[in-house]
Amino acid sequence: KQEVTQIPAALSVPEGENLVLNCSFTDSAIYNLQWFRQDPGKGLTSLLLIQSSQREQTSGRLNASLDKSSGRSTLYIAASQPGDSATYLCAAPEAGGGNKLTFGTGTQLKVEL
Amino acid sequence: DGGITQSPKYLFRKEGQNVTLSCEQNLNHDAMYWYRQDPGQGLRLIYYSQIVNDFQKGDIAEGYSVSREKKESFPLTVTSAQKNPTAFYLCASSMIPGQATGANVLTFGAGSRLTVL
């Protein structure tokens, strides 16, 4: 059964810093991995989906990488802003395909002025 | 605008009552999902459906029921058998993996917060 772990659980940084959020998964036979953002009391917003054939995916100041062999993914946020404050979750599919996702518990990010 | 609508946003239930959470999507997605979110825990899958009139149990289906009579709608009933129903419930939808590039991307609704009094 797929297990997803995110470190750190919480992170506080000053505005302008570059930062890295980590995600690890136990079953490396995945065909993609997704990163989501969740604002307090809201639903999840998809940020990036990395296919297993890709090593990186970029959207604006966000860059996500995937290393299946080590069971790791990272989300890099460049030049952080207060508006980036949210919880970031990664999700990996269950072995065998399909779209049943296992979510990590998230990293709660606070970017301070 | 295309998206997923969940209602109600807040719901209070007395012990022993069944309640139904609504989820409607106009994205023409075949697959729909219900997740439960508790503080400090990741999202856990309750039920999912890939086609009308068919659905499968997720990891924590006990005490819940669903129906999929229309492609657009996937209501969740929290029954009195659910021992600890207070949680944030999230509905999502996607295309079927393989239908198109990016089919795996899940779109989420805004969530429904259920509190048992």
Image: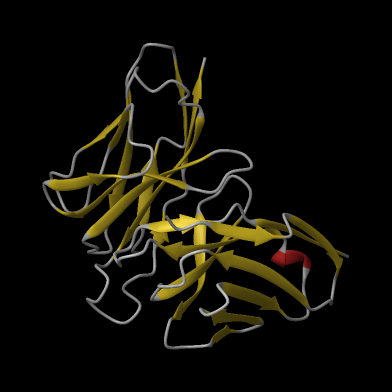
Residue sitting at 77 percent across and 71 percent down? A81
The image's colouring method is secondary structure
Give the quarter of the image for residue B35: top left
Q: Residue A13, position in %: x, y?
A: 85, 66
Along the viewing direction, whichever of A10 and B110 lies nearer the viewer = A10
- Left or right: B58 with respect to A22? left
- Left or right: A21 with respect to B36? right
Residue sitting at 30 percent across and 66 percent down? A96
Along the viewing direction, whichever of B69 and A99 lies nearer the viewer = A99
Q: Where's the N terminus of chain B, which quadrant? A: bottom left
Residue sitting at 55 percent across and 80 percent down? A66
Asked whether the viewer can see residue A88, the reply is no
Identify whether A41 is placed above or below B85. Answer: below
Give the quarter of the image for residue A76: bottom right
Along the viewing direction, whichever of B104 and A4 lies nearer the viewer = A4
Q: Residue A19, position in %: x, y?
A: 77, 74
Along the viewing direction, whichever of A109 and B61 lies nearer the viewer = B61
Identify whether A73 is placed above or below B40. Answer: below
Asked whether the viewer can see residue B49, the reply is yes
Q: Residue B62, position in %: x, y?
A: 33, 30
